[in-house]
Amino acid sequence: QEDNKSLTNLYSHVTRSMTKIQNLHPSHFSLTQLNEELQCMALIHALSCPEYNNFVTSLFLL
């Protein structure tokens, strides 16, 4: 019973969090745009080598 309660609480927490996230982006924000942003984030994350630190920092300042 306790595990079910924890699972229910977790599900509720995730659902509330997703609602907050969805409310933060513009209504016209599409799945295609999300995929493009995720691709950019993955590329930035892949540039974690020290020689790219200045470049990555400048991207985050934009």
Image (cartoon, rainbow, N blue to C red):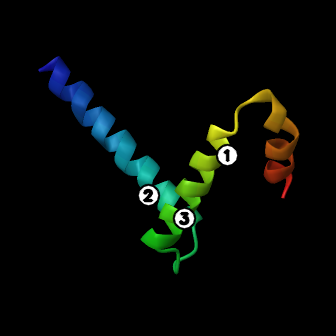
Closer to us: 33 or 10: 33
The circle on residue 19 is 2
Check disc 2 and give the amino acid type: Thr
Q: Which residue is mark 3?
A: 36
Instruction: Examine the rendered structure and indicate whether residue 21 appears above or below residue 32.
Output: above
Please tell me which residue is depicted at 84% across the width and 45% down the height of the picture: 55
Q: Which residue is mark 1?
A: 44
Indicate the position of residue 54 as horizontal and vertical percent values.
88, 40
Q: Residue furthest front?
A: 51
Local secondary structure at mark 3: helix
Indicate the position of residue 6 as horizontal and vertical percent values.
26, 26
Comes first in the chain, label 2 or label 1: 2
Check disc 1 and give the amino acid type: Ile
Comes first in the chain, label 3 or label 1: 3
Local secondary structure at mark 2: helix
Between tags 3 and 2, which lies in front?
3
Give the image quarter of residue 12: top left
Closer to us: 51 or 39: 51
The circle on residue 1 is none
Please tell me which residue is depicted at 16% across the width and 27% down the height of the picture: 4
Q: Residue furthest bottom?
A: 28
Please tell me which residue is depicted at 52% across the width and 74% down the height of the picture: 29
Closer to us: 57 or 4: 57
For residue 19, side relative to residue 37 (left or right): left
Check disc 3 and give the amino acid type: Glu
Please tell me which residue is depicted at 79% across the width and 44% down the height of the picture: 56
For residue 59, side relative to residue 6 (left or right): right
